[in-house]
Structure formats: C-alpha cells, structure tokens
Image: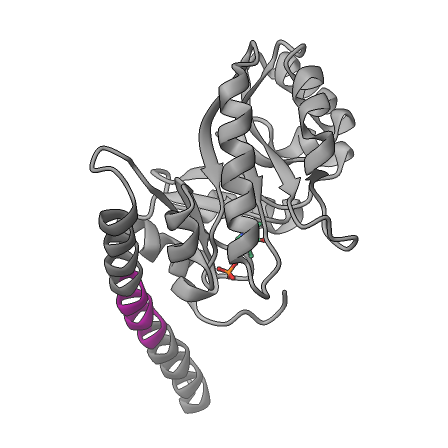
Amino acid sequence: MPPFMMILLWKALTKMAVDLISIDENYKRIMFESGEAMAKYRKPDEKLDIMAVTKTVEPAAVNHAVELGLGLLGENRVQEYLSKKELYDKRAEIQFIGHLQTNKVKYIIDSVSMIQSVDSFKLAAEINKCAAKTGKIQDILIEVNIAGEESKSGVRADKLEELLYQAAELNNIRVKGLMTIPPAENPEIYLYNMQKLYIDISGKNIDNISMDFLSMGMSGDYTDAIKYGSNIIRIGRGLFGPRTYK
Ligand SMILES: *Cc1c(COP(=O)(O)O)cnc(C)c1O
C-alpha cells in the first residue's frame, strides 16, 4: 500500500475510534440522565424505550449503539434507510419516524415494526393497503403538531380525534399511541399539552385504538419529555454527535 493511502486509512480508523468513544460517553450520560428523570418523575414499574435516531450516521456507528444496548433505531428518510438497512446489525428493531410520502410506503412496510409519523388519513389508508398485501398488521403512531406550526408535519390537535376514528376502521393498521416534535424553543408547555391530550384520548377508550406509546423527547428536551409521560425518547445528536445536514 502506498504511504499516502496508509495515512488516509489511519486517519479514517482513528476518527472512527474517536467517534465510538464519544458514543460510549454519550450513551452513559443519556442512560444516567434518563434514569434519574424516570426515578424522579415516574412510577417504578413504568418503562422507557430509548431510540437511536440514525439520520446521516454511518452504519458502523449505528451498530456500535446497538452493541451498547440501543436496539431500537429511528429512520427518517426512505432512500437513506434503504441504502443502510442491509448493513445494520440484524438484532436492531427499526421504526420509521420521518415524513413519509404515500408512494414510498411500499419500500419500508416489510421491515419496520412501527411507523410513528402518520398524520393523515391518506397515509394511514396507504399503509393499510400495503400492510394487507404483505399480510401484516402495521403498528403506527399518529404524529401531532402540538404547537400548530405551519412549517411542521403532524395532525393538529383539534383534528386528532377525527383521524383516530377514521384510522380505527382500517383492519391492517393498529394505532398504538401518539408522537410529537415540539418547538425547540420553550418545549415544556407543549410537552405538557401533549401529555394532557394523550391522557384525554386514552380516557375515551376508542375501539381498535390503544394508547400504549407517547413518543416525545429528543436530545435537547428528553428529561422534560420524561417528566410529561413520554415512554419513547428519540435521540440523535446527543448520542452520535452533530449532523452534517438536518
Ligand atoms: C432528528 C430527529 C430526532 C432526533 O433529534 P436530535 O435533536 O438529533 O436528538 C428525533 N425525532 C425525529 C422525528 C427526528 O427527525
């Protein structure tokens, strides 16, 4: 091997090693802080899933997180996911959390355990159709735009119940709860509002709808999200470090 290639290889390897060490440290911090928040705010028998959000992250780093025990992966982009999925540790469980176009559902339906980002009847109906073809019942969460932000996806809180009743009619999907991405600025009031909404919907006992999961909390707000009842937190940058794109 020519020396310049040795240098490149060495650089690549040491960068990788350093990245993995920072993932270890981040992992410890997240486990500690989420554990503390669970102890402080929640009942002892309540569970928390910690999802590793993989956008822009190379498969070797993702697999390192799986190795550490973060076996639940969150995928945002269909193309990126398809290019990486064969390289992932086979123990990983994959959930889709990004904006999903109806024409892309067919590419992911056979390999995801849950689609967290369903925000329209049109999308729910397409998932139902693809799930029926695959012979599966697809778990989904409904994504709520809790702050009513124009720029964000998610169903608005005042339209949630209508969508739930419509989704309940579809035989090949099961609504398992709610997901949200609150505004980055002052998320706490929105996390609180989301918890209220979740409890309110749970209390309505809608047929064919279960409220098992409240998915909220990212790198910047996961301890607050735990305070307001989240049982799936979704961590990207806080685990893998900064991203090259959003
Ligand atoms: C990127 C992303 C996350 C993780 O965000 P971080 O701030 O990197 O922790 C969580 N949920 C969704 C839907 C995302 O797109």
- Could you tell whether 216 is left or right of 27 in the image? right
Measured from the top left, where is residue 8 in percent x and y? 44, 83
Name the residue: 69% across, 41% down: 154
Q: Between residues 30 and 236, which one lies in front from this camera angle? A: 30
Above or below: residue 179 compared with residue 175: below
Closer to us: 184 or 241? 184
Asked whether residue 82 appears in the rendered view, the answer is yes
Provide residue 117's location: percent of width, then percent of height. 62, 38
Image quarter for ligand 1 equals bottom right
Q: Measuring 58% from the left and 63% from the top, which residue is drawn there?
A: 184
- Note whether residue 51 is visible: no
Q: Quadrant of residue 25?
A: bottom left
How many marks the image carries: the answer is 0
- Residue at image coords 64%, 45%: 146
Q: Would residue 101 be found to the left or right of residue 83 on screen?
A: right
**Residue 20 within the magenta-colored segment of the rendering:** yes
Q: Main secondary structure of the magenta part?
A: helix
Across and down, in percent, residue 123 comes to 73, 29
| Relative to 218, 162 lies left or right | right
Query: Is residue 235 in the magenta section?
Result: no
* Position of residue 186 measured from the top left corner of the image (x, y, whole percent): 56, 63
Q: Where does the N terminus fall, quadrant-wise?
A: bottom left
Which range of residues does the magenta coloring cover?
A: 17-27
| Position above or below: 135 against 115 | above
